[in-house]
Amino acid sequence: MATPTQTPTNVPEEPDPFFYDYATVQTVGMVLATVMFLLGVIIIVSKKVKCRKADSRSESPTCKSCKSELPSS
């Protein structure tokens, strides 16, 4: 049977610098992911709606970028 060679000393414990509240980290991550996803969808839809409205009119200068993306025939 092994016996300890030194008596245990009381070392004051420092707070762990790598302690994370995983529930909060997960919640914040999901909220940020949702917000970024919705912003991306809104940006994509708004660009398509803007171009569709401009294409229904005759030669609108507000949508030159949309018309330049279309291949010319």
Image (cartoon, rainbow, N blue to C red):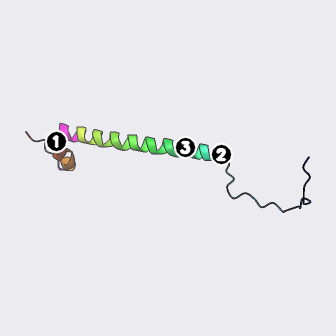
Q: Residue at x 38, y 41 (%)?
A: 42
Counting from the top left corner in percent of width and height, residue 8 is at 90, 59
Q: Which residue is mark 1?
A: 70
Badge 1 or badge 2: first in the primary sequence: 2
Badge 2 or badge 3: first in the primary sequence: 2
Would residue 59 be counted in the magenta stretch? Answer: yes
Q: Nearer the viewer, residue 22 or 44?
A: 22
Q: Nearer the viewer, mark 1 or mark 2?
A: 2
Q: Amino acid at mark 1?
A: Leu
Q: Which residues are magenta?
A: 53-61
Q: Which residue is mark 2?
A: 22
Q: Nearer the viewer, mark 2 or mark 3?
A: 2
Classify 34 as above or below 14.
above
Q: Measure the alpha-carbon separation of dots 1 and 2.
A: 48 Å
Counting from the top left corner in percent of width and height, residue 25 is at 61, 47
Q: Residues within 10 Å of mark 2 (few under 14, many from 20)?
A: few
Q: Residue at x 19, y 39 (%)?
A: 55
Badge 1 or badge 3: first in the primary sequence: 3
Q: Amino acid at mark 3?
A: Val
Q: Which residue is mark 3?
A: 31
Q: Which mark is residue 20?
A: none
Counting from the top left corner in percent of width and height, residue 5 is at 90, 58
